[in-house]
């Protein structure tokens, strides 16, 4: 049995005040906090669900944007190992406003047990952090999300995902999918050597109708049993995914798979 508890899922765009995403995963004897959202509400919501986040074995960060990392401020001292892409803690900006992690890489090493990996990283034989996602589709990742400290456009190369292997197929969990959800699905299947997908859950980063249409067509062809668009997409994208059987998830919802 795999249990996924939604600690925070706001559906606004990443630049809005209440945007955020965080889930808690219990799988194969491991307790994993995936993303930390924007504030200490994740601790409050975890408590409501009977979860002590300080008992986590791992914290996996999908990427370095503030609405996925700000909650780290309330987890200092946690013994869990934190897994992220090496660029996750670079300074990031949008319209001269910081949208990056509250901590630099040096501060992260001071406060936490940090594992940085550009390559895919197996937590155990059934759970893998994908590292940097190869960007192969021509319609995804065409626009930058703000810029880096050096002034260069930020295409969020640190964007990653977590995959759980089961005997019924893969469970793929994304944060925002700045790497492209289609690219993520392709790479997850490649790394895990598995074609079947049981669950696709997380942020899909879809705000362009043409990109959404191509994405929905691709996902439809994957014959995924359960699709849960959660964060970083607009109402049009939600409605199109619902046409192929997708369901919304909400804060404090628990999925048992």
Image (cartoon, rainbow, N blue to C red):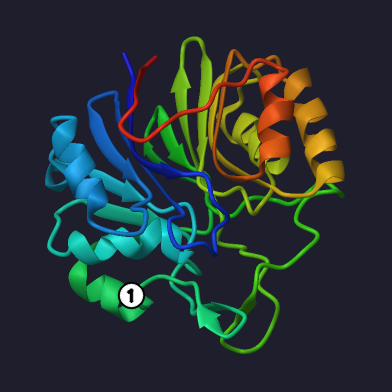
Percent x, y of residue 53: 17, 44
In this picture, is 88 found above or below 42? Answer: below
Say if residue 195 shows up in the picture.
yes
Residue at far bottom of view: 150
Quadrant position of the C terminus in the picture: top left
Query: Which residue is depicted at the point 81% across and 59% down?
Result: 142
The quadrant holding residue 15 is bottom right
Any part of residue 116 in sight: no
How many residues crowd around disc 1 within 10 Å: few (fewer than 14), some, or many (20 or more)?
Answer: many
Q: Position of residue 231 (x, y in %)?
A: 53, 43
Secondary structure category for the residue under label 1 = loop
Which residue is nearer to you in this view: 22 or 26? 22
Q: Is residue 149 above or below residue 183?
A: below
Q: Quadrant of the N terminus?
A: top left
Left or right: where 77 falls relative to 91: left
Pick the residue in front: 40 or 68.
Answer: 40
Which quadrant of the figure has residue 73? Answer: bottom left
Looking at the rendering, which quadrant does residue 132 occupy? Answer: bottom right
Left/right placement of residue 207 relative to residue 130 reads: right
Which residue matches tag 1?
103
Count every numbered label the image shows and give the total. 1
Foreground residue among 184 and 139: 139
Q: Is residue 156 above or below residue 257?
A: below
> Residue at 20% across / 51% down in the picture?
80
Question: For the view shown, which residue lies furthest in the top direction?
Answer: 168
**Residue drawn 63% across the image and 44% down it:** 233
Q: Looking at the picture, how far across and down is residue 23, in whole percent? A: 35, 39
The front one of 29 and 180 is 180
In the depicted structure, whether residue 194 falls above or below residue 61: above
For the point 14% across and 38% down, the residue is 47
């Amino acid at each position: 049995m795999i249990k996924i508890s939604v600690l925070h899922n706001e559906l606004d765009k990443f630049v809005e005040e209440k945007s955020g995403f965080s889930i808690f995963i219990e799988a194969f004897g491991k307790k994993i906090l995936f993303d930390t959202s924007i504030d200490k509400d994740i601790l409050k919501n975890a408590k409501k669900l009977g979860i002590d986040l300080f008992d986590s074995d791992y914290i996996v960060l999908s990427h370095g944007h503030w609405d996925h990392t700000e909650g780290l401020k309330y987890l200092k001292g946690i013994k869990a190992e934190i897994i992220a892409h090496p660029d996750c803690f670079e300074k990031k900006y949008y319209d001269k406003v910081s949208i990056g992690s509250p901590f630099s890489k040096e501060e992260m090493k001071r406060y936490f047990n940090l594992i940085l990996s550009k390559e895919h990283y197996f937590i155990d034989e059934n759970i893998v952090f994908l590292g940097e996602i190869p960007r192969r589709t021509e319609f995804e990742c065409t626009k930058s999300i703000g810029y880096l400290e050096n002034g260069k456009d930020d295409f969020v190369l640190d964007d990653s995902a977590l995959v759980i292997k089961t005997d019924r197929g893969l469970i793929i969990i994304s944060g925002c999918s700045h790497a492209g959800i289609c690219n993520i699905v392709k790479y997850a299947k490649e790394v895990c050597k598995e074609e079947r997908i049981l669950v696709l859950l997380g942020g899909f980063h879809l705000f362009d109708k043409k990109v959404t249409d191509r994405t929905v067509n691709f996902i439809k062809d994957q014959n995924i049993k359960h699709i849960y668009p959660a964060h970083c997409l607009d109402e049009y994208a939600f409605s199109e995914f619902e046409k192929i059987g997708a369901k919304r998830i909400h804060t404090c919802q628990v999925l048992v798979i």
